[in-house]
Every structure is written in C-alpha cells, then in structure tokens.
Image (cartoon, rainbow, N blue to C red):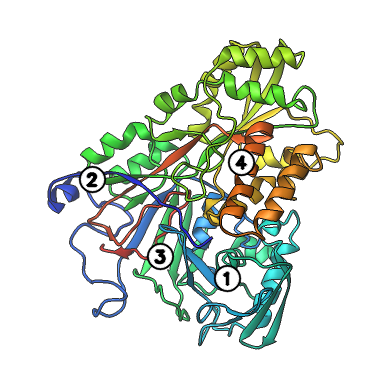
Amino acid sequence: MEEQLKITRRSFVVGGTAALAVAGLGLAGCGGGGGEAETEGAGGEGGEATGTLTAAVAYETTNFLPANNSSALAVGANWHVVEGLYELDMATYEPYAALAAGDPTQVSDTQYEVTLREGAAFSDGTPVTAADVVSSYERTVGAEGALYLSMLSFIDSVESKDDTTVVFNLKHPFSLVKERLSLIKVVPTNATDADLTAKPTGTGPWVYDSITESTIDYTPNPNYTGSKPAKAATMHWDIIKDDTARTTAMQSGTVGVMENVPSNVIDQLQAAGATVESVQGFNLPFLMFNTKKAPFDNKKVRQAFFYAIDVEKLIANTVEGLAAPVTCFLTSDHPNYHEAATVYTYDPDMAKRLLEEAGQTSISCKLDTTDHPWITALSPSIKEDLAAVGITVEIGEQASGSLYANLTDTDEEIQPFDVVLAPGDPTVFGNDPDLLMNWWYGDNSWTQKRTCWKDSEGYNSLRAAMDAAVQATGDEQQELWNQCFDILADEVPLYPLFHRQMTTAYNATMVEGFKPISTTGLNLLDATALV
C-alpha cells in the first residue's frame, strides 16, 4: 500500500501582528528572555543554531527503552534522539531515509539490502555498523513482551553482509518494508537495556542531556550526519500532565509549543496570541473486555456496552465536538476505510435486548480507567448510560503503568479485571491497516494477557484474514481488510468509542517550522527556535 493517510486539518489561527502575540504570551520562560530572534538557526547561512525550543508535553513515563515502548512521551521524545534505518514524517506518514543511505535494494521478493549512510555514528562518536542494526533488531523482537514483534513478524532474519550493509530476509513478500523498518531503532550493541531505559543513546540530531520526572533537556548531537540537524542550541520539555498547568505554561510564554490542548481552553489560548490547530487522527478511547471472564466472554454483552453509550453526547460534552464517531476501526479519511457491517449508534433498547439474549439483564462490574484527564472526564457519562440499561459499574482510576502492570503481572488463568476504559494511538508507529490492527490484535501482550482473546474463534478468523491480506495487493487486499473490520466490529474485544482530533498550540514568535501532527507526541525535528 503506497497511498498515505489523507489528513484533514481544522485550524484556529489568531489574526493580528506578532507584536500582539508577544504581548499576550510574554515570552517569559525557558524560551530565553524576551526579544527578537538573534539567528536564523541551523540550516540557514547564519552559522550554528541558537536559542531554545521549549514545549509542554502531556504524558509521563520512566521507561524510554526504544526497543519496547508505547508511551506517548517516550516514543515522541525518542524521535529526536534515536533513528531507524527509515523514519516517518509524522505530518504525512511518508517514509524517508534516516540512518540508511537511500531506499532498500530489492534482491528478490523476500530479500532486501540496506546500506548505512556515510559517516553514521552514535552521539559518542562511535561508528555505527551493520552489526548494531542486527543487534537492535534482535533486542526489539526478543524484548520481554516484545510490543513490536507482531508488527515485524514478516521478517524471518536479519544479518550483516559487511560493516555497512544489512540484509533483511522476509517470510513472504511484503509491500511496506521501509515503513516497518522505522520500528527498529538502532542503538549501540554494547548498551544495556537498563542504560537505554533511563537515557537512550542514538544517532539522531539530538542527545538527551537529562531526563527527570518533570523535565527533559536535549543538546544537539555533534556527530549527526543526517538530513534533519538540530535547529536550536538546546531543547527543553516540561512534563506537565495537569491540563490547567500546561495551559498556563503556554499562555504565559514559558513554552513555545503545547501538546494535547483541552478543547475548553482553545479560545483562551487564541486570545493570548497562540496558534491552535486540530488535526483529525486515529487517537481514541477504547473499551477493553476480559473476554475469558463471564459475562464478558459473550460478545452480545460486549456489544451491549457500545449500544448503551451515547457517543455523540461524549463528543459534544467532553471534547467540544473535536472527534468523529466510529463507523469502522479506521477513521473515515483513511485511504483503506470501509464502513463496518456493524456500526454502533446510541440505542438503549438494542442494548437491553442483547443483554436479555445473553441472559444478563442486570450486571455489576468494575470499570478500570487510566488517569488521563480527558479519559476520566468520560467516566461519569458512561456510567450513567450503562446504568440506564442495567449495567452498574464501579469506577476505578489509576495511572496507566499501574493499570497494565496489574493486568500482566499475574499467572491466574482468568484475569481478575472486568472492563477497561483507556486511550490508545498506535499511529505513532505508522498508519497502514495491518500495523494498526496488529498493535491490539496481534499475538502479543494485548491478546495474551489483556483482552485474553488469543485462540478464540473470532481471533483465529481475524488472524487468517490479516495474514492473507499482507500477502495480497489491490482490490483483493482491500476486501480482506474489510473482512477484518467487520470481525472487529462484531467481536469488540477492544474497540474504539470515537476517533479524536489532536489539538496542539504553538507561538509563532518563538518557533517556526513546527507542524502539528495527528497522533500523540510532539515532533520538533523541523522546528527552528526563534528565541
């Protein structure tokens, strides 16, 4: 599949002069003093870059291990520090050569060779070799839990032909080699997982200077030889999970870019001189069920939840309309979109009928949620809607790290949880249908230890269609993916409630070249500091 996701933007741009923006935002914080830009930054003709790129990010983590990570903070931060042979332009999902010198050379239908870019070195000056790529692949697929394994399962083996040439042997023909190789972040062979978890070393344009619970500081990589050099003397991220505090940091000029702008502060930031953009994305809240535990082992019970919840009300009241109802696992603007055979609309009577057919007219259960503010805002309305059809839920809120640890760190045959409400967005890794489905429905921790859906009849049907689809092309491939979308909408072991627009704010007097993206995380690889 060579087509790319057609991203639509809804932009909120403040009129007026830069002077008004400066007056509103103050430029008071880490951007480094008020005043005009002193240099045009790296890539221009004015010499070395100066100034500081500043941002307020919305998520937190203590695990930055590039080989096995799904944290919005770690994945986004690592875009700047570690590289794959290929990377994705996160604004378009177009792949480009990063650590590679150019496109893969196709030796046969199932073998590709990739040459490293000239002068490639880690940030400590150590040359990168093909052996580092091989060991990074082995670290990725051999990691405990191996989150990326199902998205790399088309690879049979990886070997070094010589110091600068890597050979990829595939299990079957695969049309998305460049896109998927971006998942393998190349790190030094001798680096330990402990070192890489705390502060990764890579070949990207930036180097981690320090990582704390509240801040990340970067400096340019002096040994970077790629196409996206750092365009500031330093970069500083404030980790601010609280929406109000993050908004204050943006409004006061402490930071030049703000991730995850709450819909109810858009006007407030506009009035202060910020540019605010919302980009339709795949980001979603999902309901996940323990499919081995009664009554959630009955798909009619799972379906009843989706008919019982007034999603349009959730979208209007909690995200100010900046989302789209689900009519397929994919968003409606995706090039491979196809409306699913089952589309859930608000229908309490249907929910009651399904529960009655399942012999469950009254259910009491625990609804565990993550503590992301926009997720917790959904809980009261969901609880009320479910109660109206006879499903009484007790809400339990906790940090996502604790929540998922509790689901996986047990040897019980049947997991103790009932239902989970949480956010997710695998488009940080790519946007082809196979990748997106493999994230939640591959042979990995999601199906083994979370939904516990692996080896069920629905799972086996989905996997058969997915495995056939990646070896097909054109209309045949699309038809197989359509079958997958229908299976997921019918089985709903884990399924979206809606797809969110991602809203980002930035101050055009502090940063230029910044592109808001449709997924979680911030990407400042093309951004230049103006202060």
Q: Secondary structure at mark 1?
A: loop
> Residue 341: x, y in percent?
59, 33
**Which quarter of the picture shows residue 473?**
bottom right
Query: What amino acid is found at the position of numbered circle 2 in the picture?
Result: Val
Q: Secondary structure at mark 3?
A: loop
Q: Cα distance, mark 3 to mark 1?
A: 17 Å
Q: Quadrant of the C terminus?
A: bottom left
Q: Which mark is residue 525?
A: 3
**Which quarter of the picture shows residue 422?**
top right
Which callout, 4 or 2, points at the residue further toward the start of the chain?
2
Residue 62 shows in the view: no
- Tell me which residue sits at (45%, 24%) in the image: 312
Query: What amino acid is found at the position of numbered circle 4 in the picture?
Result: Phe
Check disc 3: other Cα within 10 Å, few if <14, some if 14-19, many if 20+.
Answer: many
Residue under label 1: 201
Give the answer, above or below, for where 439 lies relative to 302.
below
Which mark lies nearer to you, 3 or 1?
A: 3
Residue under label 2: 13
Residue 165 shows in the view: yes
- Tell me which residue sits at (77%, 44%) in the image: 460
Check disc 4: other Cα within 10 Å, few if <14, some if 14-19, many if 20+.
Answer: many
